[in-house]
Amino acid sequence: MSEEWSDTEISTLLNDNGMRATPQRMAICKELLLKKCHRTPNELHEELCQRFPTISPNTVYLTLSQLESSGLIRRFYVDGQAIYDSNTATHDHIYCRVCKLLLDVGTENSIHTPKCTEEWSIEWGTRVWSGVCPKCH
Ligand SMILES: [Zn+2]
Ligand SMILES: [Zn+2]
């Protein structure tokens, strides 16, 4: 995905995935898809509230789950918290439990596809390494 998506391209993407291109959905796509980032639904909601004071948490949750169903973003859990990831390439994560820093780690597929998964159709997977980052210990 390029960084130069136009509004038309984003609305086409939404339409292609069965979603109407409302201004809120467009904004969610811009926040998440164009940046290859990690966001919790609450963080995303807070960011969007600055521009769309009336946007409801439900709209954010629903849009995220629609984008996830379409394979445009991935979801995983850290400390019981749902994290949405717009980097859909297979990769691991490293997490600091003190400052909550969450980073992508490597993309070596071999890590994710042990022999027992050979006959499966694997769509995505991630491992989360958690601990304390250099700044925090
Ligand atoms: Zn830290
Ligand atoms: Zn990631």
Image (cartoon, rainbow, N blue to C red):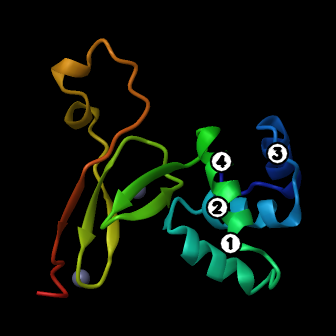
Q: Are marks 4 and 3 in contact (CB under 8 Å)?
A: no
The spot of residue 86 in percent (x, y) is 54, 54
Identify the residue at image location x=80%, y=46%: 14
The residue wearing badge 4 is 67
The spot of residue 6 in percent (x, y) is 82, 56
Spatial CA span between label 2 and label 1: 6 Å
Spatial CA span between label 1 and label 4: 15 Å
Which of the 4 image quadrants contains residue 81?
bottom left
Q: Residues within 10 Å of mark 4 (few under 14, many from 20)?
A: many
- The amino acid marked with disc number 4 is Leu
- The amino acid marked with disc number 1 is Pro
Q: Are marks 2 and 1 in contact (CB under 8 Å)?
A: yes
Point out the tag, 2 or 3, that comes first from the N-terminus. Answer: 3
Q: Residues within 10 Å of mark 2 (few under 14, many from 20)?
A: some
- The amino acid marked with disc number 3 is Met
The residue wearing badge 2 is 61
State the SS at label 2: helix
Q: Quadrant of the C terminus?
A: bottom left
Residue 57, numbered label: 1
Of the two numbered discs 2 and 3 in the rendering, the one whose residue sits closer to the viewer: 2
Q: Quadrant of ligand 2?
A: bottom left
Q: Is residue 1 visible?
A: no
The residue wearing badge 3 is 19
Of the two numbered discs 1 and 4 in the rendering, the one whose residue sits closer to the viewer: 1
Identify the residue at image location x=32%, y=78%: 100
State the SS at label 4: helix
Identify the residue at image location x=62%, y=50%: 65
Residue 58 or residue 129, whichever sits in front: 58
